[in-house]
Image: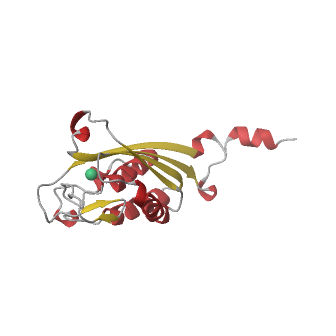
Amino acid sequence: MNASDLRVGQGFDIHRFSDDPDRVLVLAGSVFDGERGLEGHSDADAISHACSDALLGAAGLGDIGMHFPDTDPAWKGADSLTLLRHVVGLVRSEGWEVANIDCAVVCERPKLAPRRDEMQSTLSEIVGAPVSIKGNRAERLGAIGRAEGVACFATSLLVRRPDSRVSHPEDTEQDAP
Ligand code: MG
């Protein structure tokens, strides 16, 4: 494997809590009953959005705003897991496999730990690789610290699929007797 067979990507997303009592809080596809929902054109799943952006960034395929513009009624109320699944398909079609995604979620609420396994397994199943989710509080600093929303940072690693690898001169040299 050559260094050019690896790509790292970073994604960030933040959504504010909604005043609409009918909005449902969805994070990594899990519904948190009894919690305030987040504002957004789609279901506002900040974790899935950050993961999608990390994958698109790693593959050099732009960002989710480009692929799913919030001016397009097609994505109104969209299930963000569907968007993530679509992104994984795009990344694969470019010859990449996901190695892993690591997420740092910053929020005062909800408590993520009790739902962590469920969220990780939902996202892992979609991307076909381990997804880790860590919850962090903002220690009362800033908007997130005042419990006004949820932010997520995601990092992804992509590995070029063997069938789409180009041969590198240095690989040939290593194989030579
Ligand atoms: Mg978003």
Identify which residue, 126 or 95, lies in the foreground: 126
Identify which residue, 64 or 25, lies in the foreground: 25
Residue 91: x percent and y percent? 46, 56
Residue 30: x percent and y percent? 35, 64
Q: Quadrant of the C terminus?
A: top right
When the figure is inspected, residue 160 is found, relative to residue 79, above or below; the finding is above
Q: Quadrant of the N terminus?
A: top right
When the figure is inspected, residue 80 is found, relative to residue 58, above or below; the finding is below
Color scheme of the displayed model: secondary structure
Where residue 139 sits, quadrant-wise, is top left
> In the image, is 87 to the left or to the right of 3?
left
- In this view, the residue farthest toward the right is 177
Where residue 32 sits, quadrant-wise, is bottom left
Q: Is residue 144 visible?
A: yes
When the figure is inspected, residue 145 is found, relative to residue 85, above or below; the finding is above
> In the image, is 158 to the left or to the right of 140?
right
Q: Which residue is located at x 21 percent, y 40 percent?
A: 146
Residue 49: x percent and y percent? 33, 53
